[in-house]
């Protein structure tokens, strides 16, 4: 039986609708992305331009930074 190669998720990501959104300040979409071997948290916010066109604005936060912040709060 042939062994499957490990999945390479470099330079790719995933985004899901945030069903737990409790405030307008919370992201509309949340997910993860890998860029050049670095993992990031990805937040997406649905916005409307001055011309009325809807778009998604993104914010990236390194996962490593997020983990370090959580450890310093403990």
Image (tube, rainbow, N blue to C red):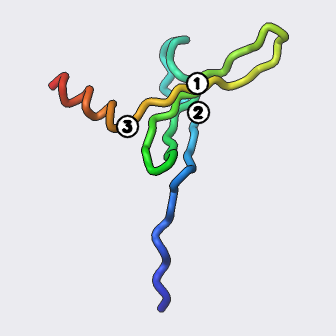
Image coordinates of residue 20 in percent, x first then y, are: 48, 26
Using a 10 Å C-alpha cutoff, classify the residue at mark 2 as few (fewer than 14 neighbours), some (14 to 19) or many (20 or more).
Answer: few
Q: Residue at x 57, y 38 (%)?
A: 16
Using a 10 Å C-alpha cutoff, classify the residue at mark 3 as few (fewer than 14 neighbours), some (14 to 19) or many (20 or more).
Answer: some
Image coordinates of residue 32 in percent, x first then y, are: 49, 41
Residue 28 marker: 1
Left or right of 46 in this view: 53: right
The tag earlier along the polypeptide, 3 or 2, is 2
* Residue bearing mark 2: 17
Q: Is residue 5 above or below residue 8?
A: below
Q: Are marks 1 and 2 in contact (CB under 8 Å)?
A: yes
Q: Is residue 73 above or below residue 63?
A: above
Alpha carbons under labels 3 and 2: distance apart: 19 Å
Image coordinates of residue 23 in percent, x first then y, are: 50, 12
Image coordinates of residue 48 in percent, x first then y, are: 74, 14
Query: SS at mark 1?
Result: loop
Using a 10 Å C-alpha cutoff, classify the residue at mark 1 as few (fewer than 14 neighbours), some (14 to 19) or many (20 or more).
Answer: many
Query: SS at mark 3?
Result: helix
In this view, the residue in front, 17 or 46, is: 46
Q: Residue at x 45, y 35 (%)?
A: 41
* Residue bearing mark 3: 63
Query: SS at mark 2?
Result: strand
């Amino acid at each position: 039986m042939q062994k499957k190669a490990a999945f390479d998720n470099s330079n790719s990501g995933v985004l899901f609708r945030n069903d737990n959104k409790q405030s307008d300040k919370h992201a509309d979409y949340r997910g993860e992305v890998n860029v050049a071997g670095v993992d990031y948290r990805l937040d997406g916010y649905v916005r409307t331009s001055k011309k009325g066109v809807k778009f998604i604005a993104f914010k990236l936060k390194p996962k490593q930074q997020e983990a370090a912040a959580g450890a310093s709060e403990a």
